[in-house]
Image (cartoon, helix red, strand yellow):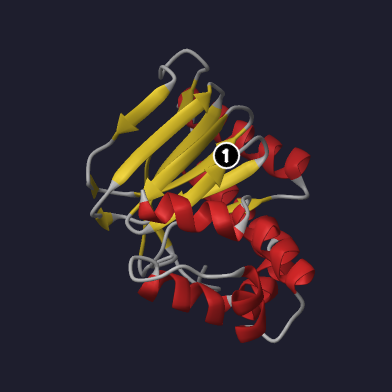
Amino acid sequence: MEEKFVITEISRGVMVGKEEYPKGTISFSHTLKYNELIFHFSGQATVFFDDLILETKPNTIRFLPEGTTKRYDVDLYEQGECIDVFFSADRPVSRQAFVIKVSQNEKLGALFKKLFSTWVSKKEGYYFESVSLLYRIFAEMQKDTAKPNRHKLKIAPAMDMIHSDFLKRDFSLSELAAICKMGESYFQKLFKEIYGISPKKYIIQLKI
């Protein structure tokens, strides 16, 4: 996620209930007119966005960049609730979709709820207050993700190799760990902390 950007518009904020989408695979439009920032309060799903596989669970935030994507499918295996904020910025917030597990989930969850209630109230000044709340959310996200981002850089060499060669050959855990110059158990721990699944399952889902 970029450290500096200007929010140019909030298009809408919506709350998605547990019964809104049935379990199973849901295919969404491949063109996103706005960036989306989604806080998941409950439920579990696997999101296939471009070449990425993203695991959403309770107290995770999912970001989707505006523009055209090759694939946007969601395998929903536990229905849940989330708040989705659609917005634009003066520059790419992130060129890739991502999911983060937040440690300050009560604070961030409360900010999303406040933004949603402010948005739907349509009271005097609601728009500027909503923008202010979205900035506060991004500020808390930057504080919360400093450590995971450092970890992501540590395993970046392995991720580059996986994404370039996953259709051509198989990878062992020892090979992936070695290219990142770390032990197998530590590599697997960092991988699961960032992506929510093991390296083996991640590669299998990429192939599927």
Instruction: Name the residue rendered at 59%, 27% in the picture.
Output: 43
Q: In the shown orientation, is residue 109 left or right of residue 161?
A: right
The reply to whether residue 150 is in sight is yes
Q: In the shown orientation, is residue 183 left or right of residue 132?
A: right
Instruction: Name the residue rendered at 38%, 74% in the picture.
Output: 165
Residue 4 position (above or below residue 110): below
Q: In the shown orientation, is residue 88 left or right of residue 173?
A: left
Quarter of the view holding residue 189: bottom right
Residue nearest the viewer, comparing 111 with 94: 94
**Residue 15 place in picture, x, y as percent:** 49, 25
The reply to whether residue 13 is in sight is no
Quarter of the view holding residue 183: bottom right
**Residue 72 place in picture, x, y as percent:** 31, 44
Instruction: Name the residue rendered at 35%, 67% in the picture.
Output: 90
Residue kind at label 1, given as amino acid type: Phe
Residue nearest the viewer, comparing 155 with 130: 155
Which residue is farthest top?
19
Considering the numbered disc 1 on the image, is that residue within a helix, a strand or a loop? strand
Find disc 1 in the rendering and name its residue: 39
**Residue 40 place in picture, x, y as percent:** 58, 35
Residue 87 position (above or below residue 43): below
Number of numbered discs overlaid on the protein picture: 1
Instruction: Name the residue rendered at 36%, 56% in the picture.
Output: 65
**Residue 204 place in picture, x, y as percent:** 46, 52
Q: Answer few, some or many: residues within 10 Å of disc 1's Cα (few below 14, many 20 plus, some between 14 and 19).
A: many
Residue nearest the viewer, comparing 157 with 126: 157
